[in-house]
Amino acid sequence: MSSKPDLRVLVGRQEIEKTIGRLADNINEDYRGKNPLIIGILIGSFVFLADLIRLLEFPLDLDFVRLSSYGAGTETSGKVRMALEPGAQIKGRDVLVVEDIIDTGYSLAFLIDYLKKKEPASLKLCVLADKPSRRQVPVEIDYNGFTVPDEFLVGYGLDYNEKYRNLPDICILGEGE
Ligand code: IMP
Ligand code: MG
């Protein structure tokens, strides 16, 4: 029996940095002269968000929501609820949602539906990683860092049972875990 976690680097820190630079360039172009409200989804997006917003060159407001889906382990169930609601007013704002990874799409479809009802001036979505092979509901992504295979990923904010968020690279967690 080994206690060493089975981790393989999928995206290294240099490639992450380069990709976030590319995302920030696109976001800077689209939001120039605006003052958007950026909403990060806790907890997973916090590392990505921290790196991304420091490259943004327009004034912005920052808020967070927390979603939780019923069901444990590595599978998301279709039922999502909001464990922490946004504190900021959404109505009339240019809202940019920042998420770590989109998998089935249930979480983001739920959040986008919730936010649209609050009548933002505009609503866009930025994800660090997209796992399109597992999508159950369609979600339009405006800015995507990486398209990733159907593997369970950890690191750079992503967790498995709250572990591994601190790894600097995006890693594949093997079956052994
Ligand atoms: P969805 O509702 O299935 O799209 O799930 C999205 C959420 O599930 C993300 O916010 C993550 O918290 C989590 N998730 C999905 N895939 C992974 C993964 O590979 N590693 C870590 N978390 C994941
Ligand atoms: Mg999440």
Image: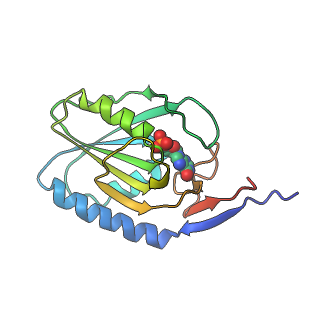
User: Compared with residue 7, is residue 62 higher up or lower down, i.e. above or below?
Assistant: above
Q: Is residue 33 left or right of residue 130?
A: left
- The tally of labels here is 0
Measuring 81% from the left and 56% from the top, which residue is drawn there?
3
**Residue drawn 35% across the image and 58% down it:** 144
Q: Is residue 131 visible?
A: no
Q: Examine the rendering and report whether any part of residue 167 can be seen.
A: yes
In the picture, measured across the screen, residue 138 lies left or right of residue 90, that is: right
Residue at the extreme right: 1
Residue 41 point in image, percent of width and height: 42, 41
Residue furthest out toward the left:
33
The quarter of the rendered structure image containing the N terminus is bottom right
User: Whole-percent x and y of residue 71?
Assistant: 60, 31
The foreground one among 176 and 82 is 176
Q: Position of residue 43 (x, y in %)?
A: 49, 42
Query: Is residue 51 shown left or right of residue 166?
Result: left
* 43 or 121: nearer the viewer: 121
Rendered location of residue 55, percent (x, y): 30, 61
* Quarter assignment of residue 77: top right
Q: Is residue 139 left or right of residue 43?
A: left
Q: How is the image coloured?
A: rainbow
Q: Residue at x 40, y 41 (%)?
A: 137
In the displayed structure, 41 sits above or below 7; it is: above
Q: Residue at x 36, y 64 (%)?
A: 20
Quarter of the rendering containing residue 139: top left
